[in-house]
């Protein structure tokens, strides 16, 4: 039995970019680009990430899908490289809340409220919507002025007059 060698980074790129493309409504189009890439480069497990991206871009250009690929990569590249655990995320939120003067029990009550709702959820879509609601409640409680973006979707837009730190000169 033959085993297929896999470059772990190719797998991460494919799944991450296609996930972002799904959020953008271009998943089916970009799936064709990845399928063509896999057919054209059977030894892709030896490629660097730059070579992978370059060859994906060439295929996307030939398929008139470069803009769609570029857009999906843009959102993919904004994802944190190391995914925090639930415990690490919650500890960070609590630490931020404390610095902002929000009592820890108030944050824990929100966590508990949405944890209980998640236990009753019957579908992945319902769980996702509940997680958006919980994040939005914490976002508002902390008085965050910037946008809340989850899974490539803007859940809460930035307040008028808000400028990202990186754009301030």
Image (tube, rainbow, N blue to C red):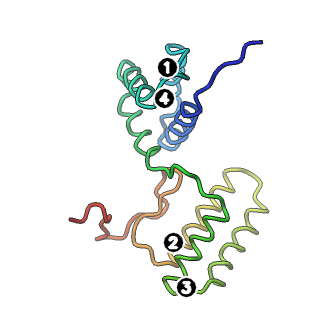
Task: Name the residue beneath numbered marker 2.
Answer: 139
Where 115 sits versus 28, above or below? below
Picture quadrant of residue 97: bottom right
Contact between labelled residues 4 and 2, with CB atoms less than 8 Å apart: no
Contact between labelled residues 1 and 4, with CB atoms less than 8 Å apart: no
Where 59 sits versus 93, above or below? above
Give the total of numbered labels: 4
First in residue order: circle 3 vs circle 2 = 3
* Secondary structure of the residue carrying numbered label 1: helix
* Secondary structure of the residue carrying numbered label 3: loop
* Secondary structure of the residue carrying numbered label 4: helix
First in residue order: circle 3 vs circle 1 = 1
Please state the horizontal and vertical placement of residue 5, each as a whole percent of the image. Answer: 64, 21
Task: Name the residue beneath numbered marker 3.
Answer: 102
Picture quadrant of residue 7: top right
Task: Name the residue beneath numbered marker 4.
Answer: 30
Please state the horizontal and vertical placement of residue 142, each as a whole percent of the image. Answer: 50, 78
Please state the horizontal and vertical placement of residue 138, each as a whole percent of the image. Answer: 56, 73
For marks 3 and 1, give the CA distance: 50 Å
Q: Is residue 127 left or right of residue 8?
A: right
Q: Residue at x 35, y 33 (%)?
A: 67
Q: Residue at x 53, y 51 (%)?
A: 151
The residue closer to the viewer here, 102 or 91, is 91
Task: Name the residue beneath numbered marker 1.
Answer: 37
For marks 4 and 3, give the CA distance: 44 Å
* Secondary structure of the residue carrying numbered label 2: helix
Task: Specify few, some or many for label 1: CA neighbours under 10 Å numbering under 14, 14-19, or 20 or more.
Answer: some
For marks 4 and 1, give the CA distance: 11 Å
Q: Is residue 25 left or right of residue 112?
A: left
């Amino acid at each position: 039995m033959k085993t297929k060698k896999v470059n772990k980074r190719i797998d991460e790129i494919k799944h991450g970019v296609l996930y972002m493309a799904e959020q953008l409504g271009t998943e089916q189009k970009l799936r064709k680009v990845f399928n063509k890439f896999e057919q054209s480069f059977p030894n892709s497990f030896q490629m660097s990430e730059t070579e992978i991206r370059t060859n994906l871009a060439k295929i996307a250009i030939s398929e008139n899908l470069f803009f769609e690929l570029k857009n999906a990569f843009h959102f993919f590249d904004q994802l944190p490289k190391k995914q925090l655990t639930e415990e690490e995320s919650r500890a960070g939120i609590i630490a931020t809340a404390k610095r902002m003067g929000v009592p820890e029990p108030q944050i824990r009550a929100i966590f508990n409220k949405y944890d209980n709702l998640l236990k009753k959820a019957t579908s992945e879509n319902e769980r996702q919507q509940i997680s958006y609601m919980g994040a939005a409640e914490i976002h508002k409680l902390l008085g965050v002025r910037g946008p809340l973006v989850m899974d490539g979707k803007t859940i809460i837009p930035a307040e008028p007059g808000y400028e990202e730190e990186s754009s301030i000169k």
